């Protein structure tokens, strides 16, 4: 192995495919998007450089941008907090049970691997006013709300509904990450703590949490980025409605780019989304301590 690491040709051979893929699939498209964000471009004519005009319209004229940014930040906070708490609780519970552990792991993780488009359509029918939940409530004489049509409040009801559906779908991912980290902790630490009279709650607080902190930072970063680029569930459940009240940055980008063919304007939204993702990732890595301990 040391001989291979000293061989520059071997290093180039191993690194070149990943570097080429990264350049073609990620780096070049990002550079193109940044360039198009400064242009008026509809794919039928050559890009026309217009400077910061797209960004000026985005932040001063576009009435949907404010709603989309607010909803994206709501998803960010909701997803990071709820998936952190729910994922840790599920991981702790499943780690401490012996019978049925694999069954429950599969049950909670299954929604993560299912198509978000199909799940969006499924939950749309569940929350349809005359079907699903409202039909069940009607059997008890209760008139259910318009789950996906309400427009009252700073964060409207449809956004809460979609956020809880997203939590249901992706909490299994956080759970599996935490369980993988917890399983790597030596049982000797817990046995010593229990001998000293430590309860399971205190063991979780003073042993488990400090030792899984690196995975917490990783999971929070994944949840934050995933929530900011959230698209498929919203598009299939509400398509950004009613009256654009459930738009997020990703759906607004899709609408401007693929419905109105404003590729320059959509690229500007994409650049804003990229910058927000980078800022959030930096903040998480800066403020979530990830000291490494021997396990």
Image (spheres, rainbow, N blue to C red):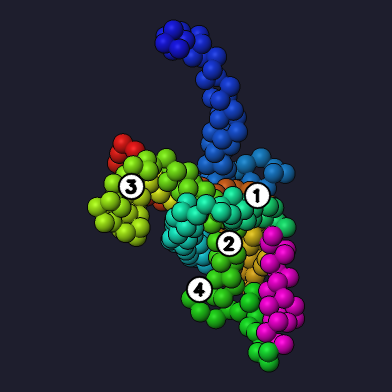
CA gap between label 4 and label 1 equals: 29 Å
Q: Which secondary structure class fits the magenta region best?
A: helix
Q: Looking at the image, how many numbered discs can be counted on the residues?
A: 4
Query: Who is closer to the viewer here, 12 or 201?
Result: 201
Mark 4 and mark 1 lie on one chain; the one further toward the N terminus is 1
Mark 1 and mark 3 lie on one chain; the one further toward the N terminus is 1
- Tell me the SS state at disc 2: helix
CA gap between label 3 and label 2 equals: 34 Å
State which quadrant residue 162 falls in: bottom right
Q: Is residue 145 above or below residue 155?
A: below
Residue 286: x %, y % from top left = 32, 46
Tell me the quarter of the image containing the N terminus: top left
Question: Label for residue 10?
Answer: none
State which quadrant residue 25 falls in: top right
Query: Who is closer to the viewer here, 160 or 190?
Result: 190
Side of 94 relative to 207 (left or right) = right
Question: Label for residue 191?
Answer: 3
The answer, for residue 222, to whether it is visible in the render is: no
């Amino acid at each position: 192995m040391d001989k291979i690491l000293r061989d520059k040709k071997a290093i180039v051979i191993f690194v070149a495919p990943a570097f080429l893929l990264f350049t073609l699939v990620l780096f070049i498209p990002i550079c193109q998007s940044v360039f198009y964000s400064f242009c008026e471009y509809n794919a039928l004519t050559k890009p026309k450089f217009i400077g910061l005009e797209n960004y000026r319209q985005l932040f001063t004229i576009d009435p949907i941008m404010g709603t989309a940014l607010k909803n994206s930040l709501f998803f960010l906070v909701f997803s990071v907090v709820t998936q952190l708490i729910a994922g840790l609780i599920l991981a702790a519970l499943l780690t401490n049970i012996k019978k049925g552990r694999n069954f429950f792991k599969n049950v909670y993780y299954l929604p993560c691997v299912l198509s978000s488009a199909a799940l969006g359509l499924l939950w749309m029918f569940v929350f349809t006013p005359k079907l699903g939940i409202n039909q069940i409530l009607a059997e008890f004489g209760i008139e259910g709300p318009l789950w996906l049509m309400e427009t009252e409040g700073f964060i409207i009801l449809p956004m809460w509904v979609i956020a809880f559906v997203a939590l249901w779908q992706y909490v299994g991912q956080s759970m599996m990450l935490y369980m993988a980290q917890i399983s790597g902790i030596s049982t000797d630490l817990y046995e010593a703590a229990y001998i000293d009279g430590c309860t399971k709650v205190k063991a979780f607080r003073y042993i488990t949490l400090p030792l899984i902190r690196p995975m917490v930072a990783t999971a929070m970063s994944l949840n934050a980025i995933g929530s900011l680029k959230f698209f498929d569930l919203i598009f299939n459940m509400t398509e950004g409605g009613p009256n654009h009240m459930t738009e997020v940055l990703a759906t607004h980008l899709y609408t401007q780019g693929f419905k109105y063919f404003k590729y320059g304007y959509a690229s500007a939204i994409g650049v804003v989304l990229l910058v927000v993702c980078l800022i959030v990732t930096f903040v998480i890595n800066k403020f979530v301590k990830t000291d490494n301990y021997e396990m």
